[in-house]
Amino acid sequence: MTRELRFGRYAFVHLDADLYSPIIKGLEIFYPLMSSGGFLLVHDYNAWPGARDAVEEFCALQGIVPVPMLEKSESCVLLKP
């Protein structure tokens, strides 16, 4: 990750990797860099077990609740307080 990305702030991040490892790593990297009120979207949250497991594990540690989206890809959104 470049210096600019590591020290930036984000209002919106979209993770679409389907598997546990890249999703959990994306959450660990980008969620702390989110601006208050920012949204992090995880594609295929309910379509791929690895994506769902990563989100559920991460959210449990952070004390946040993923909000499922009612759309074809079964994504979810995490809101940064």
Image: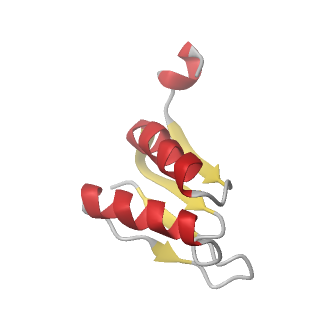
Where residue 57 sits: x, y (%)?
36, 62
Q: Position of residue 38 (x, y in %)?
A: 48, 51
Query: Position of 45 compared to 64: left or right?
Result: right
Q: Residue at x 43, y 36 (%)?
A: 33
Judging depth in this view, the residue of 70 and 9 nearest the camera is 70
Q: Residue at x 51, y 56 (%)?
A: 39
Camera-nearest residue between 37 and 66 = 66
Tell me if residue 34 comes above or below residue 23 in the rendering.
above
Residue under the image location 46 percent in, 37 percent down: 29
- State whether residue 52 is above or below residue 31: below
Between 17 and 41, the residue placed more toward the observer is: 17
Residue 78 screen position, x and y as percent: 46, 62
Name the quadrant of the C terminus. Answer: bottom left
Q: What residue sits 57% from the left and 17% below the top?
A: 4
Q: Residue furthest bottom?
A: 70
Residue furthest out toward the right: 72
Percent across and percent down for residue 62 are 27, 55
> Taking 54 as reference, is 60 left or right?
left
* Quadrant into which the N terminus falls: top right
